[in-house]
Image: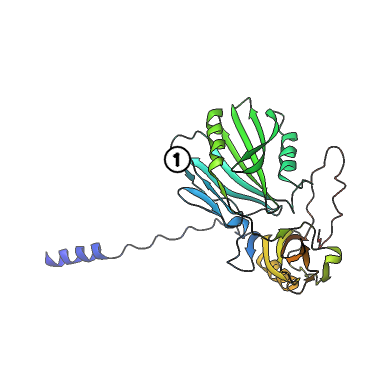
Amino acid sequence: MRALNFVLAALLAAPTPPTPPARVPAGVILVKGAWSSASDANTPVPEGGKATALNYQSSYFHLAYPFAAGWKQRFEGPPPSDRGYYVLAQIEPTGEHVGSVLIEAQDLFFTPTAANSALELVSYAGSHLRADYRMERPITAVTLADRSFARLDYVSPVTGLHWSVLATQIRCHAVQFTFTSTHPEVIQQLVAGLQDMTLGADAAPVCVKDHASGTNVLNRIDPILTDRRFNSIPVRIVIDTGGKVKFIHFISSFPDQARVITDALQQWRFKPYVSAGRLVEVETGILFGVQPSRPLISSKQDPQLPPARKHDTT
């Protein structure tokens, strides 16, 4: 009997065998796609914002957006796209699902259209709504938290869903809040909550589109892309007051592409940028790899679009 009890005690005390890891189905290969990265871990980047239990904070955009009571972020968004589009936060109520808040950003250096401002992006979206959507009022300019926003309101009569889109321009990005609900009063409450958002003083480098081109570039070494050459690689750089590349942010790239492009950009030299009589740092964008196609503007191709090139610096 003692021997039996000893065996039972040993079995009970034995560690539980580990659960075998899930296996990849036969014939399936998982490959991590292009991702965002940066030349250092301390300089803020657009995708580096964090959602806490109470708010969304972004050091890059210098903003803090407080969540409505009982709302929070459930899931993190995907990585940035190769068009410079970011899902910064997705916020939902913890109880009854009465709506949602989506915080996004579109890099205006790499827009899929020829839009150069938050207003132009919102206007483009309003003029390209699906046939079963209807604008509820003309696009308007509103001031919230001491900042100007472009506002677009539209509805799906079939589903009863309402959307309010409010976009403002920060550091050459269109930062956009999209409120969705079947209850217009919920949207109005959420929009009013933007008044409690804080936007800090913008001490960031001066944003200059297309600065990395023409006579601004004093020395340039083109990266040689070998294995992967068919994806778009949008890159934001900060140029110091001496004309050297100080910081590199890859919005979407493979690691080997980031290494090659970093080696090349560290050898670039730029004409120092002068603003208001003093030298200042500049933030600008460069597109490597394949020039992505853009949609037609009205009935003809946008005349601002350059021809596709392997290494485009526009």
User: Residue 164 location in percent, x, y?
Assistant: 62, 35
Q: Is residue 188 above or below residue 228?
A: above
Task: In this rendered view, identify the residue nearer to me: 147 or 230.
Answer: 147
User: Residue 4 location in percent, x, y?
Assistant: 16, 64
> For numbered disc 1, what is the local secondary structure?
loop
User: Residue 37 location in percent, x, y?
Assistant: 63, 63
Task: Name the residue at the top extreme.
Answer: 157
Task: In this rendered view, identify the residue nearer to me: 155 or 147.
Answer: 147
Task: In this rendered view, identify the residue nearer to me: 241 or 34.
Answer: 241
Assign the N terminus to one quadrant of the image. Answer: bottom left
Residue at image position (72%, 29%) is: 131
Q: Is residue 76 above or below residue 31?
A: above
User: Residue 230 location in percent, x, y?
Assistant: 76, 59
Residue 27 in view (yes/no): no
Residue at image position (65%, 49%) is: 105
Residue at image position (68%, 28%) is: 137
Q: Is residue 170 above or below residue 193?
A: below
Q: Which residue is mark 1?
A: 69
| Quadrant housing residue 312 | bottom right
Q: Residues within 10 Å of mark 1 (few under 14, many from 20)?
A: few
Assign the C terminus to one quadrant of the image. Answer: bottom right
| Quadrant housing residue 247 | bottom right
Q: Is residue 216 left or right of residue 46?
A: right
